[in-house]
Amino acid sequence: MKKIIIAIDGYSSCGKSTLAKQLAKKLNYVYIDTGAMYRAVALFALQNGFIDVDFFDEKALIQHLDKINVSFSFNAELNTSETFLNGKNIEKEIRGIIISNLVSKIAKIKEVRAKMVELQREMGKKKGLVMDGRDIGSVVFPDAELKIFMTAAFEIRAKRRFEELKAKGDNTSYEAVLKNIVSRDDDDTSRTENPLIKAPDAVVLDNSNINQEEQFLIVMNLVNEKLKS
Ligand code: DC
């Protein structure tokens, strides 16, 4: 059976990982959440005192990049892939608002991106991969067989993320979540290094007014076309 690479890019909190996980499960492909990789680097920088709300020692982080090992492991019990930083499970820590507010600064750094892109390309060597992020179709895998560019209205994304955090016991307010999304969109699209852009051959998927099942069916049709061709 032919195996392809599916690149999913788009704005934050558009449900990229939900779609990517559904596809990986259905196709029996590997799923890689590249946002988690940047979040892991942000956590490393925070833990080592290289970054905080009001300061960032970029040079120190760059000098210590070779001390960072990010990996993923599938947790069968929870039926989900979990992120590890130097062997430690950091899944919970990297999803909170502290890392969400720092991660854009980390994702701007050329050296950080170069290291992440190299790791990501390595993961795609055997194909059979669904990868989500911001630069997957444009930079990491410009030859990916299927590229999806996801978008949705600000307020809808903020509401979804707010509910998700609340369900996990995180008390961040809706206003704080909305503010974070607006500022991350701005950071993602305005940075010099690999900004969020739609690859010319990507299919745009606006999920403001469709549910997860509908979205999944639309994309599975696209996948099936690619597998046939
Ligand atoms: O998808 P996410 O919200 O977990 O991503 C976290 C941050 O990392 C976000 O600020 C965008 C950035 N990112 C990136 O620059 N490139 C990627 N391929 C994935 C994420």
Image: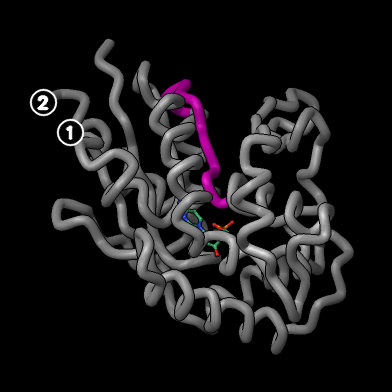
- Residue 229: image tag: 2
Does the beta carbon at disc 1 come under 8 Å from ligand 1?
Answer: no
Residue 31 in the image, given as x and y percentages of width and height = 51, 33
Task: Quadrant for residue 106, please give it.
Answer: bottom right
Horizontal side of residue 111 vs 84, given as left or right: left
Seen from the viewer's position, the closer of residues 142 and 202 is 142
Residue 124 drawn in magenta: no
Please, which colouring scheme is shown?
A: one colour
Between the residue at mark 1 and the residue at mark 2, the CA separation in whole angstroms equals: 6 Å
Question: Does residue 169 sit above or below 144 in this rendering?
Answer: below
Residue 131 in the image, given as x and y percentages of width and height = 44, 39
Q: Which amino acid does label 2 sit on?
A: Ser
- Residue 172: image tag: none
Residue 199 in the image, given as x and y percentages of width and height = 21, 56
Task: Quadrant for residue 193, please give it.
Answer: bottom left
**Quarter of the image with the N terminus in it:** top left
Residue at the (73%, 55%) spot, across then down: 45
Residue at the (81%, 77%) spot, across then down: 172
Q: What residue type is labelled 1?
A: Glu
Residue 26 in the image, given as x and y percentages of width and height = 46, 28
**Quarter of the image with the C terminus in it:** top left
In this orientation, does residue 116 appear?
yes
Q: Which residue lies furthest to the bottom in this view?
A: 175
Identify the secondary structure beneath mark 2: loop
Q: Over which residues does the magenta segment extend?
A: 26-35
Horizontal side of residue 157 vs 100, given as left or right: left
Identify the secondary structure beneath mark 1: helix
In this orientation, does residue 209 appear?
no
Q: How crowded is mark 2: few (under 14 residues within 10 Å), some or many (20 or more)?
A: few
- Asked if the residues shown at circle 1 and circle 2 are in contact, with their CB atoms under 8 angstroms apart, the answer is yes
> Would you name the residue on which mark 1 appears?
225
